[in-house]
């Protein structure tokens, strides 16, 4: 039961987290998955099937862009995603929205609504 | 190799454009390679990613709408393509199955003079009641019908009294192709003392009698 709501809540903020991870430097798929897992202390364990559609959507919206790397030696080519200027602006706006929601929710939950 | 097989199973279940499928395939293989490089075994990677069905389901759940529309269009086109192919094959099969008649010209299968001579020879054998020879010149079901009883029965439906054979009249020829085999058909009139009989005979490529009709 809890798992279902947890998944729904997480899904809503994944765009924000992915944009945040790409804010500093370009990253490839598996790198995003492992950094998200490590930096959230295992709260956000994404799978490829969840991450890539998010990346495709963000790219379609022009918030990120991608390019395949030139392989060096035996290394396989990787698709790197990088933030666009539009993405940087969007990140600031989405973050603000999130902070308002988080503040509002916290205030509501702590506000002594009779249970 | 195992990774390619695993990823192939995922990709086949994706509901998106062909271009996106190719992209996802490349990205998944690249991710698996990155994990293997970091020291994981393929079994661990597969366990983390899930079964091909689950991975594809996750992709499909969140696939952009345009990709889903592409998939529906692709599936529809594929269906139409298969339908057209089936209809085309059915058409070819029907064309092959049904007989196609055309004018008989001297070509690779028959010569007009040979067909006419063979037809006249058959009628002569019938007139002489030389059925043993005629049976040797025939093939297929007709062989069983070339008996005195059957022929007398057929003759009596044309006229009770024929009289002696006088001469051959006009002839018309055509070539029939059916199920890849060619046949020569000839309609030839024969004048008898009391009756004019029109024979229709057909021969196979080896000039053996296949059918006989008289009126």
Image (cartoon, rainbow, N blue to C red):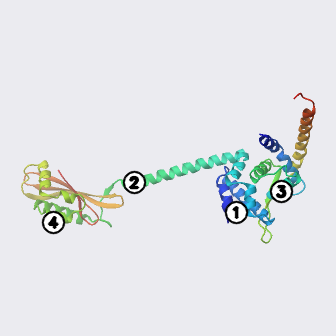
As helix, strand or loop, the secondary structure at mark 2 comes to helix
As helix, strand or loop, the secondary structure at mark 3 comes to helix
For mark 4, what is the residue?
Answer: B133
State whether discs 1 and 3 lie on one chain.
Answer: no
Chain where mark 2 sits: B
As helix, strand or loop, the secondary structure at mark 4 comes to helix
For mark 3, what is the residue?
Answer: A34
Other residues around mark 3 within 10 Å, as few (<14) / some (14–19) / many (≥20): some
On the image, the x and y values in percent for residue A45 come to: 81, 51
State whether discs 4 and 2 lie on one chain.
Answer: yes
Chain where mark 4 sits: B
On the image, the x and y values in percent for residue B21 come to: 68, 55
- Gap in Å between the C-alphas at discs 4 and 2? 36 Å
Tell which of A17 and B172 is nearer to you: A17
Query: Is residue A100 placed above or below A16 in the rendered structure?
Result: above
For mark 2, what is the residue?
Answer: B95
On the image, the x and y values in percent for residue B113 come to: 23, 65
């Amino acid at each position: 039961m809890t798992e279902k709501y947890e998944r729904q809540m997480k899904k809503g903020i994944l765009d924000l987290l992915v944009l945040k991870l790409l804010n500093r430097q370009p990253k490839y798929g598996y790198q995003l998955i492992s950094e998200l897992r490590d930096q959230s202390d295992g709260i956000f364990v994404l799978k490829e099937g969840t991450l890539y559609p998010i990346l495709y959507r963000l790219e379609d919206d022009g918030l990120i862009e991608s390019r395949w790397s030139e392989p060096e030696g035996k290394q396989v080519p990787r698709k790197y995603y990088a933030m666009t200027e539009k993405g940087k602006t969007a990140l600031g706006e989405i973050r603000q929205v999130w902070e308002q929601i988080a503040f509002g929710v916290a205030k509501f939950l702590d506000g002594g609504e009779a249970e | 190799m195992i990774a390619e097989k695993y990823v192939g199973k995922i990709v086949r279940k994706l509901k998106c454009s062909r271009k996106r499928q190719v992209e996802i395939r490349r990205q998944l293989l690249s991710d698996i390679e990155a994990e293997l490089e970091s020291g994981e075994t393929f079994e661990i990677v597969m366990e983390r990613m899930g079964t091909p069905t689950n991975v594809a389901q996750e992709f499909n759940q969140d696939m952009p709408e345009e990709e889903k529309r592409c998939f529906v269009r692709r599936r529809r086109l594929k269906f139409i393509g298969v339908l057209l192919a089936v209809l085309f094959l059915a058409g070819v099969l029907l064309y092959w199955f049904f007989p196609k008649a055309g004018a008989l010209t001297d070509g690779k299968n028959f010569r007009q003079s040979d067909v006419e001579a063979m037809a006249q020879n058959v009628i002569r054998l019938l007139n002489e009641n030389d059925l043993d020879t005629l049976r040797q010149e025939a093939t297929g079901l007709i062989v069983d019908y070339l008996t005195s009883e059957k022929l007398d029965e057929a003759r009596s439906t044309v006229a009770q009294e024929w009289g002696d054979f006088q001469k051959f009249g006009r002839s018309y020829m055509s070539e029939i192709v059916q199920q890849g085999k060619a046949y020569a058909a000839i309609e030839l009139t024969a004048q008898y003392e009391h009756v004019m009989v029109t024979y229709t005979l057909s021969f196979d490529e080896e000039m053996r009698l296949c059918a006989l009709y008289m009126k």
